[in-house]
Amino acid sequence: MAIAKFDVVALDCPEPRKLADFYGAVLDGTVTDDDGEWVVLKVPGGQLAFQRSPGYVAPSWPSPEASQQLHLDLTVEDLDTAEKEVLALGATVLDNGGPDRSWRVYADPVGHPFCLCAC
């Protein structure tokens, strides 16, 4: 028997609603709670939350001196199409991996790394 049930992954950020809107567009999510300091985004399969963090510093990727803390792997049908869409929403490319790799690494608008992975 499990000790607990998974509920949500929370990301620190300077502006919770802006980051929730980014991931809402990427994952077709809906904001279910927003008090300005904590925003919950319901997405297919679970929830993401975004909490205001004064003095937020983006993770470094890749960096032997600093940890990325975590990253999200997001499955897509077509890498090229998905890449164009996340870039238009404000993501940046961290590692495009080349034409033969089935995943690519990006940073969201405040620097959290995430991967788009071809299914």
Image (cartoon, helix red, strand yellow):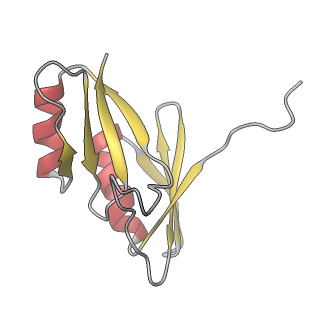
Q: How many marks?
A: 0
Residue depicted at x 53% and y 73%:
35
The N terminus sits in image quarter: top right
Residue 92 left/right relative to 51: left
Quadrant of the image occupied by residue 64: bottom left
In the image, residue 47 above or below residue 31 = above
Residue situated furthest bottom in the rendering: 55
Depth check, front residue: 19 or 119:
119
Percent x, y for residue 102? Answer: 25, 21
Residue situated furthest front in the rendering: 64
Residue depicted at x 29% and y 55%:
108
Residue 6 left/right relative to 47: right
The C terminus sits in image quarter: top left
In the image, residue 100 above or below residue 53 = above
Percent x, y for residue 15? Answer: 38, 73
Percent x, y for residue 62? Answer: 33, 52
Quadrant of the image occupied by residue 21: bottom left
Percent x, y for residue 71? Answer: 43, 45
Depth check, front residue: 90 or 34:
90
Residue depicted at x 11% and y 50%:
88
In the image, residue 71 above or below residue 11 = above
